[in-house]
Image: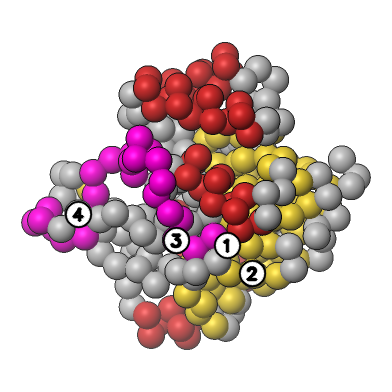
């Protein structure tokens, strides 16, 4: 169990401080006691700049975890590896496959050459199943899609001709066990935030969830789904929510109205602290 946890938002759509850059994407620097890692890398446009501006000790990073294979989460991988040197790299085995949006635009990870990737990392660990990165630090692996109202948040394909739908089975989340409860990190939440939280509770033995931070891909969600999400989050009694990136302003406004006092910003430069000292 982690005694002290600090999560720094390295990349996000909006900049939260002087001299920082925003870009469409997500990346987090995580300090869990003595273990440091990255969760996602953004597009790669602002990662290096923001890390320097925020005085991130990049050489302390031991691993990188990828939430899924879209460009706005995996695009900064080369920049990250240039900063860190060889590290352990965790990703779903389908994360680096081809990916396209409904317009036929390539939205996949820019690194497809596995041999090159292998030369830049210490080891590549595939995470289709639940995986422990270090004591108290976990990756969900594939997330069961129980609630059908929680779609992937858009229409995606694995071929440019748009014949083969992409169910985004590579989507995964992280959860960290602290003395205050479970802290959940989402890249985009394509599996559905409630599906994800219920699965994490199953994996963790129903430990209370202290916080949920990251993208929830509710940008285009209908009000029915927003109501479902708000009601379910209320039932979880989660005291700290920091939705960002692809969550969408309408969803965040719903959270602020329905779950007052729980919603926090998570922009580039934001820091979230948890553990026995906070």
The quarter of the rendered structure image containing the C terminus is: top right
Q: Secondary structure at mark 4?
A: loop
Q: Secondary structure at mark 1?
A: strand
Disc 3/disc 2 C-alpha distance (Å): 14 Å
Which region of the structure is painted magenta?
140-163
Disc 1/disc 2 C-alpha distance (Å): 6 Å
Residue at 63% x, 62% y is 138
Left/right of residue 180 with respect to residue 182 in the rendered view: right
Q: Secondary structure at mark 3?
A: loop
Image label count:
4
Comparing 152 with 27, the one in front is: 152
Would you say residue 173 is visible in this rendering? yes
Q: Position of residue 149 (x, y in %)?
A: 35, 35
Q: Position of residue 101 (x, y in %)?
A: 22, 48
- Checking the image for residue 139, the label placed there is 1
Q: Is residue 162 magenta?
A: yes
Left/right of residue 237 with respect to residue 147 in the rendered view: right
Residue at the far right in the pictured view: 277
Can you say whether 60 is above or below 264 in the image? below
Can you say whether 131 is above or below 142 in the image? below
Disc 2/disc 4 C-alpha distance (Å): 30 Å
For the residues labelled 1 and 2, say whether their Cβ atoms are less than 8 Å apart.
yes
The secondary structure that dominates the magenta segment is: loop
Q: Which residue is mark 4?
A: 165
Disc 4/disc 1 C-alpha distance (Å): 25 Å
Comparing 49 with 251, the one in front is: 251
Residue at 45% x, 27% y is 228
For the residues labelled 3 and 2, say whether their Cβ atoms are less than 8 Å apart.
no
Q: Which residue is mark 2?
A: 132
* Lower position in the chain sequence, tag 3 or tag 4: 3
* Lower position in the chain sequence, tag 2 or tag 4: 2
Q: Which residue is mark 3?
A: 142
């Amino acid at each position: 169990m982690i005694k002290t946890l600090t999560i720094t938002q390295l990349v996000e759509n909006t900049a939260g401080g002087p001299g920082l850059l925003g870009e469409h994407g997500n990346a987090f620097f995580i300090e869990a006691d003595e273990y440091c890692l990255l969760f996602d890398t953004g597009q790669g446009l602002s990662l290096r700049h923001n890390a320097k501006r925020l005085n991130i000790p990049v050489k302390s990073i031991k691993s990188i975890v990828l939430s899924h294979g879209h460009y706005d989460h995996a695009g900064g991988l080369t920049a990250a590896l240039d900063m860190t040197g060889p590290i352990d790299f965790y990703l779903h085995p389908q994360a680096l496959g081809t990916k396209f949006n409904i317009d036929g635009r390539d939205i996949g990870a820019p690194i497809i050459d596995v041999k090159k990737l292998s030369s830049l990392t210490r080891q590549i660990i595939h995470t289709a199943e639940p995986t422990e990165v270090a004591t108290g630090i976990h990756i969900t692996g594939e997330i069961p899609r129980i609630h059908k109202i929680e779609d992937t948040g858009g229409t995606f394909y694995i071929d440019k001709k748009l014949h083969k739908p992409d169910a985004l089975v590579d989507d995964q989340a992280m959860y960290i066990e602290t003395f205050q409860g479970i802290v959940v990190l989402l890249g985009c939440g394509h599996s559905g935030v409630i599906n994800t939280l219920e699965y994490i509770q199953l994996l963790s033995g129903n430990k209370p969830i202290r916080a949920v931070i990251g993208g929830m891909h509710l940008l285009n969600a209908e009000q029915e789904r927003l109501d479902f999400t708000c009601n379910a989050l209320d039932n979880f009694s989660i005291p700290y929510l920091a939705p960002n990136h692809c969550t969408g302003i309408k969803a965040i406004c719903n959270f602020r109205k329905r779950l007052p006092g729980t919603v926090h910003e998570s922009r580039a430069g934001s820091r979230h602290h948890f553990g026995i000292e906070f």
